[in-house]
Amino acid sequence: MKKKPVSRVPSEVTENPSLIARIEALDETGLIDLWKQIDAGHTPGWPPGKAFELSILRAFQLEEAVIQWPYHVKIQDTIVEEIDGFVKTTNIGFMVESKDLKDAVGIAPVAKLRNQLARRPAGLLGCVFSRAGFTQPAVILSTYCGPQAIMLWTGKEASLAFRKSKMTAALEEKYEVLLKTGLPDYEFVG
């Protein structure tokens, strides 16, 4: 019997609860349909970038990963971080940064995630998902983020992994390559 996917919701989720309920209501078929809209750059009824951001988390959740929807981290009542999400598979935990832009992502999201990881224990990874891919400076910066390891995911490979129900398998493959080579932008091809 399959376990029901779990989500852990922190005390201050930054998303509108109706968006979370909407994405959680999607089964694999519904998420594939939404992914087609994301690929086409047309997601009516969704705030800009939110369908992509939440779909990444839902795709891992459908593979029984424990996820945490976008949230704020507060220190002494001051918001110090906005996190796009967190995923914990059987073997790997990582923070998520998602960008659904028309142009390739530059260094800013990688630098932001590196700084967030620097406040956490050494075993935690970061994953930046970008529907449009990454600039060369972003790839170079992510190569030198150690000891904070950040893996880069293009929208194309995330879409492929999801459609084959291999988000976790792709994560593990990308992580193994990162461990062996130090290259954060290995492309999962299925």
Image (spheres, rainbow, N blue to C red):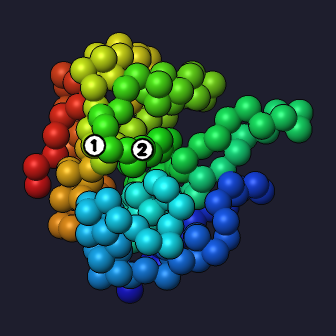
Task: Give the crowd class for mark 1: few <14, some 14-19, many >=20 residues within 10 Å.
Answer: some
Please give the residue where the numbered disc 2 appears in the rendered image: 99
In this rendering, the answer to whether 129 lies above or below 179 is: below
Q: Residue at x 54, y 50 (%)?
A: 85
In the image, is 43 to the left or to the right of 155? right
- Across and down, in percent, residue 18 comes to 64, 75
Q: Are marks 2 and 1 in contact (CB under 8 Å)?
A: yes
User: Is disc 1 placed on a helix, strand or loop?
Assistant: loop
Residue 92 or residue 140, whichever sits in front: 140
The residue lying at 58 percent from left, 58 percent from top is 69
Quarter placement of the N terminus: bottom left
Query: Quick one: label 2, few (<14), some, or many (20+) residues within 10 Å?
Result: many
Q: Which mark is residue 132?
A: 1
CA gap, disc 2 and disc 1: 8 Å
| Residue farthest along the bottom direction in this orientation | 1
Amino acid type assigned to the residue bearing label 2 in the image: Lys
